Image (spheres, helix red, strand yellow):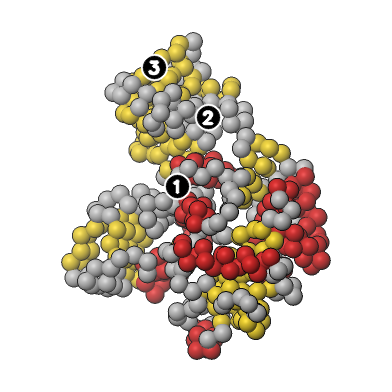
């Protein structure tokens, strides 16, 4: 379900909202939290902006990276921007793809970490381990901090261990899972970065100072950011600073959803320990996770199995092999197969489109245009288009004519005709588009005018 162009943070894997929406909404449980700063790949900018808009989150900023440089530079970007707003600002660093079941416990942990940050500590959140997990890094706590509940110095960060070593950590009792969440004063983080990783700070400062505003986004200067050392906060700062602290974050229901089995742990179970999502019918099935996105899935006489049905791919795996999905992805990439890169549903700044059917010289798509949004004024050299409105109202420019279409009405766009589609209404516009012609690729487009700067 997670693709290169549509990674897991944009999926509603647990509940009705996506993981990035849940992360942003989680901030509402905090006291005096400012609007979030989000840092993302430039190719996902409109997808992220739309997901935030749809849950009523207006971010402080959305920062666009031309290339991923890991968490230490990303946190530096956020710290520089936050410090310009408030020299005393504190930064809470949250990965966008975690599940936290109990936001009120999360808020209590953040409040304890915030008090430590006032004392110049760089704080990480340690998750109390419940099993000898080999997919997480670990934190070994040191001495208890004075006047700070369940808070300790950091004795060591430990890479992902073997099963035997993880079992020893669990028995020892002084180890936590490394959550990848942090809280610190922006000024303290930047000061430590200047001392320990000055090249990261130099590159980030230049990338921010020379960055360009693009609609609602800040695009980091690509040349400066691309040469920035790619290091995590752990490796660049936390393992070397004398200000590292860890807050025990027990009881918040944290899960980073690293596999289908970890997601299955969060879902309700039936009497046979099955998690069944969607249109699923089972008989004599035990300890199995089945997720049906589009079609009915029927299962008979299986145990310890994962079945994931999507519009693109059907996955069937033993629970013990859930972590090996990456091997399939590697094979898809090596063979040039598109399933690991693209998704059947493609997001655009104006909405989305979804492939329904295709054949020789024709293609059918379902198009959704957000309220008030419009596509570019454009033309195609190799295809004509038929549009049928199934929901909402469409404003259509077709050559020199302008027309309003309502439900069950249609129009025809001849090959080579300049045209534009707009949603003037207050509900999403949905239509079926039938393309016909000798070439139907997305690159057969000439934009004459585009509010999103894609001319």
Q: Quadrant of the N terminus?
A: bottom left
> Does residue 306 appear to the left or right of 248 in the view shown?
left
- Name the front one of labels 3 and 2: 3
Q: Quadrant of the C terminus?
A: top right
Q: CA distance from mark 1 to mark 2?
A: 20 Å
> Does residue 447 appear to the left or right of 116 in the view shown?
left
**x 70%, y 61%: residue:** 185
Report which residue position mark 2 lands on: 444
Question: Residue 276's spot in the image, x, y percent?
Answer: 28, 62
Q: Quadrant of residue 186?
A: bottom right
Q: CA distance from mark 1 to mark 3?
A: 31 Å
How many numbered marks does the figure carry?
Answer: 3
Question: Residue 359's spot in the image, x, y percent?
Answer: 36, 36
Please, what secondary structure does the residue beneath circle 3 have?
strand
Q: Residues within 10 Å of mark 3 (few under 14, many from 20)?
A: some
**x 43%, y 37%: residue:** 353
**x 40%, y 57%: residue:** 13
Report which residue position mark 3 lands on: 404
Q: Earlier in the sequence, mark 3 or mark 2?
A: 3
């Amino acid at each position: 379900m997670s693709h290169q162009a549509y990674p897991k943070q944009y999926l509603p894997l647990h509940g009705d909202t996506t993981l990035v929406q849940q992360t942003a909404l989680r901030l509402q449980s905090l006291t005096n939290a400012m609007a979030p700063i989000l840092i993302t790949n430039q190719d996902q900018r409109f997808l992220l902006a739309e997901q935030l808009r749809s849950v009523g989150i207006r971010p402080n900023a959305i920062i666009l990276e031309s290339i991923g440089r890991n968490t230490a530079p990303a946190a530096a970007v956020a710290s520089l921007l936050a410090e310009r707003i408030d020299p005393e600002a504190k930064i809470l660093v949250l990965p966008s793809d975690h599940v936290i079941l109990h936001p009120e416990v999360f808020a209590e942990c953040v409040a304890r970490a915030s008090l430590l940050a006032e004392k110049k500590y760089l704080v990480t959140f340690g998750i109390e381990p419940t099993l000898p997990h080999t997919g997480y890094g670990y934190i070994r706590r040191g001495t208890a901090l004075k006047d700070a509940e369940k808070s300790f110095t950091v004795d060591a960060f430990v890479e992902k261990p073997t099963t035997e070593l993880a079992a020893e950590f669990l028995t020892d009792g002084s180890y936590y899972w490394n959550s990848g969440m942090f809280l610190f004063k922006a000024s303290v983080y930047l000061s430590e970065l200047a001392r320990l990783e000055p090249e990261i700070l130099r590159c980030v400062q230049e990338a921010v100072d020379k960055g360009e505003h693009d609609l609602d986004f800040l695009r980091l200067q690509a040349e400066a950011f691309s040469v920035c050392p790619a290091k995590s906060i752990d490796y660049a700062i936390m393992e070397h600073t004398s200000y590292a602290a860890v807050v025990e974050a027990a009881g918040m229901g944290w899960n980073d959803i690293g596999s289908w089995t970890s997601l299955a742990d969060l879902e309700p179970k039936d009497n046979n320990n099955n998690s069944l999502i969607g249109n699923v019918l089972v008989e004599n099935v035990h300890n199995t996770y089945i997720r049906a996105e589009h079609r009915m899935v029927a299962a008979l006489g299986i145990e310890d199995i994962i079945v994931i049905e999507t519009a693109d791919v059907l996955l069937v795996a033993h629970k013990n092999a859930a972590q090996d999905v990456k091997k399939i992805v590697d094979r898809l990439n090596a063979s040039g197969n598109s399933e690991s890169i693209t998704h059947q549903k493609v997001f655009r700044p104006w909405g989305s489109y979804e492939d329904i059917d295709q054949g020789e010289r024709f293609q059918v798509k379902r198009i959704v245009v957000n309220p008030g949004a419009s596509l570019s004024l454009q033309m195609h050299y190799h295809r004509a288009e038929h549009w049928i409105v199934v929901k909402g109202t469409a404003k259509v420019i077709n050559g020199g004519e302008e027309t309003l279409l309502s439900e069950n009405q249609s129009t025809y766009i001849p090959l080579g005709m300049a045209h534009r589609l707009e949603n003037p209404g207050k509900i999403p516009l949905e239509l079926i588009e039938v393309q016909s012609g000798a070439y139907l690729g997305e690159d057969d487009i000439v934009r004459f005018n585009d509010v999103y700067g894609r001319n």
